[in-house]
Amino acid sequence: MGSTSNFEMRTIILRIAYDGSHYAGWQQQQNALGIQSVICAALQRMTREEQRLVAASRTDAGVHALGQIAVFRTATAIAPSAFVAGLRGYLPPEIVVTDAVEGPGDFHPRRDATAKTYRYLLHCGAPFHPLLRERVWMLHHSLHTDAMTQAAAVLCGEHDFRAFAASNDHNRSKVCVLSRFHIACVPAAQYFPSLQPITGTVIGCEITGNRFLKQMIRNMVGTLMEVGEGRRAPDTMTGILASQDRRRAGRCAPGCGLYLTAIDYPCPLFERSVATVRPDVSGEVPGPLWSVERPVEKRGSSE
């Protein structure tokens, strides 16, 4: 591989989509396979350099991504577009680099992010479609989305979210700012048109915030599910936040329904939006269906 003169190091920013069903999350681990390890190995084969890959979000086991951002440094002269094409030959089909661009040397995908957006999908109604088994949280019964919407509105804004954090979350500050929490219910056949015949409905929860604690989104969705079932009143969400007690919140929703969809930065990293990449695994819920929005000033992201 060609290298730059005097081994000048270049910073390459990648946008990555992956199906996390059979991985132990993003992070490299000793006893399990992480997506970071697979991409690092592919980069090392392509560049013939030892590689360290830093990502904007450390997604958990089974969680998917459409817009993960990661960065590495290289002394090669390989063009960013060549990484997009070349890595296809080294990566498994469930991991795809969708974009690459050269960035400033001090760019950090996590510290420089201003907001992150996640989407969580629940499929309500039987029979279940077998191809959705690792794509959504499957529920036999319907949920009251109006009640879920009322409860989700309480979560918008700046709060201490330790009641929704995993017990092993190591962030010093538990304060996060949620600028959007959208909930929509659409026919499953509309959300997954390529999986006909399919019955039931899909509930999509789309959340944007400046940062998120470990398992925070899954714990919020698990609690909202209990609101939708009628086991909790929407106004109990205020007391859960105030308690700062994880035991007061609901169950942790499974990772299979969670998607990292986008990372925001002060300036756009790529010419085209991640919204132009529309794999069938996520579908696309029309904007007018979203029902909760509270604009909140964005803060710097630390997670």
Image: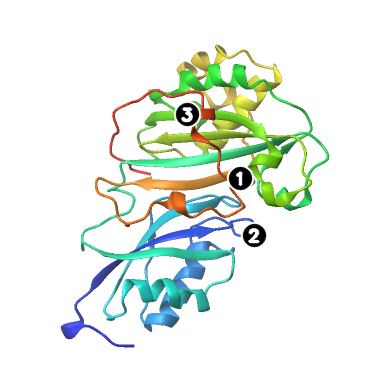
In contact (CB < 8 Å): disc 2 and disc 3: no
Q: Residue furthest left?
A: 6
Q: CA distance from mark 2 to mark 3?
A: 28 Å
Q: Residue at x 49, y 34 (%)?
A: 287
Which residue type does callout 1 highlight? Gly
Q: Which mark is residue 24?
A: none
Q: Of the two numbered discs 3 and 1 on the same chain, state the one appearing first in sequence.
A: 3
In the displayed structure, would residue 101 be above or below residue 162? below
Report which quarter residue 232 is drawn in: top right
In the rendered view, does 233 fall on the left or right side of 26?
Answer: right
| Cα distance in 3D space between marks 3 and 1 | 18 Å
Of helix, strand and loop, which one carries label 3? strand
Apparent side of residue 60 relative to residue 193 in the rendered image (left or right): left
Residue 22 is marked as 2
Image coordinates of residue 257 in percent, x first then y, are 62, 43
Which residue was labeled with disc 3?
181
* Crowd rating for badge 2 (residues with CA inside 10 Å; few <14, some 14–19, many 20+): some
> Which residue is labeled 1 in the image?
255
Question: What type is the residue that disc 2 sits on?
Answer: His
User: 49 and 121: which one is in front?
Assistant: 121
Residue 252 falls left or right of residue 173: right
Asked where in the image residue 221 lies, by quadrant, the reply is top right
